[in-house]
């Protein structure tokens, strides 16, 4: 089963390496990972998507992550209502004859063309993983030259979030 784990960590050298090593040592594969700074200076948010066999494994992972020195907070948000997004850049083969066809696929997915070349287009699409997968399947017959995807980034929906603002003291 696919699980989404979010971590709030101190933004220090080696933190990401220690966290990913924790997964690899226990032979758990990270399907996607995204990392970025938060609204608080010196604090980053990591969002991991992992596929595990049962809830006991995710509980074990969460406990091990909480033991890490630079980890401030760990949450498995899989069972909550979440807002989750991903970004993909897709370079697709394009000729003057099939460009209009490709544009007609782009519009319903609210994707956008961010670069036009003589024989290719670079398309940017954001949304849930399933939306991006569906778009990639539709665009495949035209010939995908390159594909780059970010990992999933997610938050619990606002109605589930605590109302107090968390401040972390950075030592």
Image (cartoon, rainbow, N blue to C red):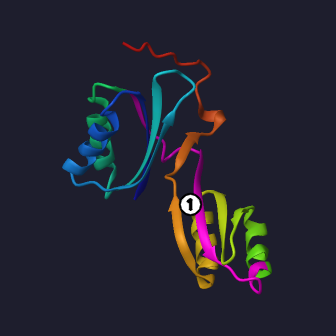
In terms of image quadrants, where is residue 116?
bottom right
Q: Relative to residue 20, is residue 97 drawn left or right?
A: right
x then y, percent, for residue 52: 33, 56
Of residue 69 and residue 87, the one placed in the foreground of this image is 87
Q: Residue lying furthest front in this view? A: 118
Residue at image coords 19%, 48%: 25
Q: Examine the structure image and report whether residue 167 is included in the region drawn in magenta.
A: no
Disc 1 target residue: 129
Q: Main secondary structure of the magenta part?
A: strand
Q: Relative to residue 152, is residue 108 drawn left or right?
A: right
x then y, percent, for residue 104: 79, 75
Residue at image coords 33%, 46%: 58
Q: Residue lying furthest left in this view? A: 25
Q: Is residue 72 above or below residue 27?
A: above
Q: Relative to residue 125, is residue 11 drawn left or right?
A: left
In terms of image quadrants, where is residue 124?
bottom right
Residue at image coords 28%, 25%: 69
In terms of image quadrants, where is residue 94?
bottom right
Of residue 150 and residue 60, the one placed in the foreground of this image is 150
User: Which quadrant holds the N terminus?
Assistant: bottom left
Label 1: few (<14), some (14–19) or many (≥20) C-alpha neighbours in 10 Å: some
x then y, percent, for residue 132: 60, 64
x then y, percent, for residue 63: 28, 35
User: Which quadrant holds the C terminus?
Assistant: top left
Q: Is residue 136 above or below residue 101?
A: above
Q: Relative to residue 165, is residue 169 drawn left or right?
A: left
Q: Is residue 38 above or below residue 145?
A: above
Which portion, as a residue range, is magenta?
A: 72-99
Q: Secondary structure at mark 1?
A: helix
Residue at image coords 24%, 43%: 22
């Amino acid at each position: 089963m696919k699980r989404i784990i979010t971590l709030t960590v101190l933004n220090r050298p080696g933190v990401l390496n220690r966290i990913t090593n924790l997964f690899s040592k226990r032979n758990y594969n990270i399907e996607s990972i995204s990392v970025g700074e938060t609204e608080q200076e010196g604090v980053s948010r990591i969002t991991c998507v992992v596929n595990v066999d049962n809830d006991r494994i995710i509980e074990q992972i969460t406990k091990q992550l909480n033991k890490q020195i630079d980890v401030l907070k760990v949450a498995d948000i899989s069972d909550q209502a979440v807002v989750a997004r991903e970004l993909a850049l897709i370079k697709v083969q394009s000729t003057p004859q099939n460009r209009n066809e490709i544009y007609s696929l782009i519009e319903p997915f609210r994707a956008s063309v961010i670069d036009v070349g003589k024989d290719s287009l670079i398309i940017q699409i954001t949304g849930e993983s399933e939306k991006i997968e569906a778009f990639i399947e539709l665009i495949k017959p035209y010939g995908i030259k390159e594909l780059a995807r970010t990992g999933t980034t997610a938050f619990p929906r606002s109605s589930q979030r605590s109302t107090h603002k968390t401040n972390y003291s950075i030592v």
